[in-house]
Image (spheres, rainbow, N blue to C red):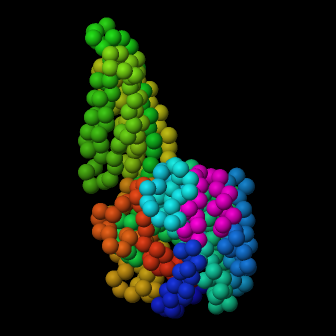
Amino acid sequence: MTTLEAIGPDIARAARAFDPDTVELRRAIHADPEIGLDLPDTQAKITEALTGLGLDITLGRDTTSVVADLDMGKPGPTVLLRGDMDALPLQEDNAVDYKSRHDGRMHACGHDAHVSMLVSAAKLLAGNKGDLTGRVRFMFQPGEEGYGGAEYMIREGVLDGVDRAFAIHVFTNLPDGMIVTRGGAIMASADKFEITIDGRGGHASAPHHALDPIPAAASTITSLHTMVGRSIDATLSGLVTVAHVEAGTTNNVIPPSAYMEGTIRAHDEHTRATLKSNVDRVAQGTAAAHGCTCSTHIEPGYPVTINDTEQAGLVGQVTNALLGEGRYAEMPRPVMGAEDFSYVLQHVPGAMAFLGVCPEGDDYHTTAPNHSNLMRISEKALGDGVALYAAMAMAR
């Protein structure tokens, strides 16, 4: 590794030299998106791009992950850099040459950018290994979008010997090239809930002969949303969103049951536990008040993503050294999105940072956000991400 004082604009300029490669790989991955834990084409593109760099490459056993180690040949810490690989089940509606060639699949969260930036960072670091110490581990991870790919890789040993970790996530609703992070909680936990309310079906003209679950479901939805503001400290962050409701088949039949599902989000584990408990309590009580019965199921999801305070501070110092003043800002509050990099940060100190990629000419407040069918990114910012990945590996 090297001292922070040695990190400066030269590294940013060196990263820019890889811009054509970074953009080419990003577009190739964007055109062939893959979903979940089995991403053979993406894995092949990564391994091909890393060939010849002198890296020790290991492919995943249970997933199509890629782990690549760059050993500098001199004692020092091991720094992990992570880039996630998977796309979303979404139809792309952008008219670009590299638009997704597969219906119902799209890189709408920028993971194609993460992979390409991380590959170029590997090239940059490999070309300068004689000046560095320790080891850099490049973690190319499938299955971030709800599949828990990080957990698979942790079980296969990706964190063995790792001293600290760093990840970048691109974000369209930030100014192009702006880098932000914060110490402590930066992203929320994400748990899924399912509720089924059981009544008794009948003719819609004679509800008194049935036990209608739909009014019970409507009251449950209202009560769940009201419960959040009446059960947690107003200075804390938590939410419950009912996002999917199903009941009935036609206009003149009262159905026997109603179903709903949604998400529970929080920025600390106490709030998370409180909301999970209260979802069940409110659903059961509201159903009973309507004479119905109720079953609930809560599926634990990603934990709160918590940055190490020192490592988050290092991001700011490195960004200022690389790109100059005005390119870094500390986030005032965490966001409600969730990330399975949270599992990595449970084991080793590290940080995740957001890189603004608002397309040129757009207002970052209103541009298509991550997870949109119209999401686009500024490829000008990718060189900044390459430089930040490399410098975070180099910095003491």
The answer to whether 65 appears left or right of 310 in the picture is: right
Q: Where on the picture, by quarter, is residue 212?
A: top left
Name the residue nearer the viewer: 290 or 203: 203
* Percent coordinates x, y for residue 184 in the rendering: 41, 64
The answer to whether 340 appears left or right of 42 in the picture is: left
In the rendered image, the vertical position of residue 147 relative to residue 66, given as above or below: above
Q: Quadrant of the C terminus?
A: bottom right
Q: Is residue 39 magenta?
A: yes
* Percent coordinates x, y for residue 67 in the rendering: 67, 66
Q: Is residue 164 magenta?
A: no
The answer to whether 322 appears left or right of 150 in the picture is: left
Name the residue nearer the viewer: 21 or 344: 21
Q: Where on the picture, by quarter, is residue 294?
A: top left
Q: Main secondary structure of the magenta part?
A: helix
In the rendered image, the vertical position of residue 307 relative to residue 240, given as above or below: below
* Percent coordinates x, y for residue 286 in the rendering: 31, 26
Residue at 33%, 63% (x, y): give it.
367
The answer to whether 189 appears left or right of 117 in the picture is: left
The region drawn magenta spans: 25-46
In the rendered image, the vertical position of residue 208 relative to residue 133, given as above or below: above
Residue at 47%, 37% (x, y): give it.
298
Residue at 39%, 49% (x, y): give it.
265
